[in-house]
Amino acid sequence: MSDEKTVTFYLSPQMRRQAERGNHNFIRQICRVVEEAGFSIAYDVNDHLGRLNAMSRAGRSLFLMDDPVDDRGLTFRRTYIFPFWHIEKQSERWEWPVAKQMFDPIAQDPVKARGFHRRWQEKLFPNEITQSGFVLVPLQGRLTTCRSFQHCSPLDMVKATLRHDKTRDIVVTLHPSETYTDDEMKALHALIDANDRLTLQHQRSEKFLFDCDYVVTQNSSLGFLGYFLRKPLILFGKTDFHHIALKVDELGVSGAFSALPDHTPDYESYLFWFLQKQSINAGRPEVQSVIQNVLKGHGWPV
């Protein structure tokens, strides 16, 4: 078989081992679709050498969470929870088609939406849900830097939350996969020392979703998961799940916080639309036909 008829997956070492053993369901479903179309399958590691190899290979490629190296490649990543996935042309979620679509709650089936929400909330978050009078602010990386997709730096976001919510405690958490510099941590601890209402918690961030009043973040997945618990969300950055959030880039900082008391979006319909209709549910029996249609939409001959 010619090199042009090969699809190479560029994966983390652990996921590569899973895929080669046939133990990764979503990758296995993609393989069945492309093999049916006459392609062979290969695997490589998604690192610098792997990307260099991809540039010299004639076939098609699928990169885990990273941009493809050319127009014959695509990226794929989990849509926050298993078994939901996206296959897209670029890795930045805020540039995906779903991010640019309009969400219409009226167009959703309310019975299906409520059932979908109930099943997934019970599966993911079976604990009691309360509002205990604090704000959850999950931080990501580069605490003192304002990146292109952000309204301000993460620490400036914390300062804005302190200014605009003058009564609640503010709980910040760090991302378990990020590495923080000494200067970043010094700046964070200086801010904590100067504000009695601000604390840093090192427990898993999901623990605080159950009890917080609302979530403030740049684009942490904790903001999306909070929708399952009907937790209002203020976004200081761009993302794909922005449709029912209060967006600082649109409302301004004061406007976003002022809108909180009257902010009651249709969480059930949104989650049904975003996950079941806009992503690939790898647990559904029709998943291969969905994957085929997505790949065709990206110009793949499948």
Image (cartoon, rainbow, N blue to C red):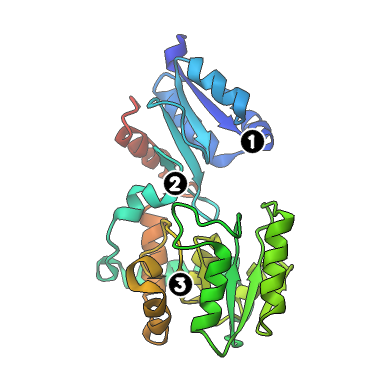
Within 10 angstroms of label 3, few (less than 14), some, or many (20 or more) residues? many
Foreground residue, 62 or 290? Answer: 62
Quadrant holding the C terminus: top left
Q: Specify the amino acid type for callout 3.
A: Ile
| Looking at the image, residue 174 lies above or below residue 98 | below
Foreground residue, 5 or 236? Answer: 236
The residue located at (35%, 39%) in the rendering is 294
Q: CA distance from mark 2 to mark 1?
A: 18 Å
Q: Position of residue 250 (x, y in %)?
A: 33, 68
Residue 123 visible to the viewer: no
The residue tagged 3 is: 234
The residue located at (27%, 61%) in the rendering is 102
Q: CA distance from mark 1 to mark 3?
A: 32 Å
The residue tagged 1 is: 12
Within 10 angstroms of label 1, few (less than 14), some, or many (20 or more) residues? some
The residue located at (45%, 18%) in the rendering is 59
Q: Secondary structure at mark 1?
A: loop
Left or right relative to 17: residue 34 = left
The residue tagged 2 is: 92
Residue 165 visible to the viewer: yes
Q: Position of residue 38 (x, y in %)?
A: 41, 18
User: Counting residues from the N terminus, which is met first, the one under dot 3 or under dot 2?
Assistant: 2
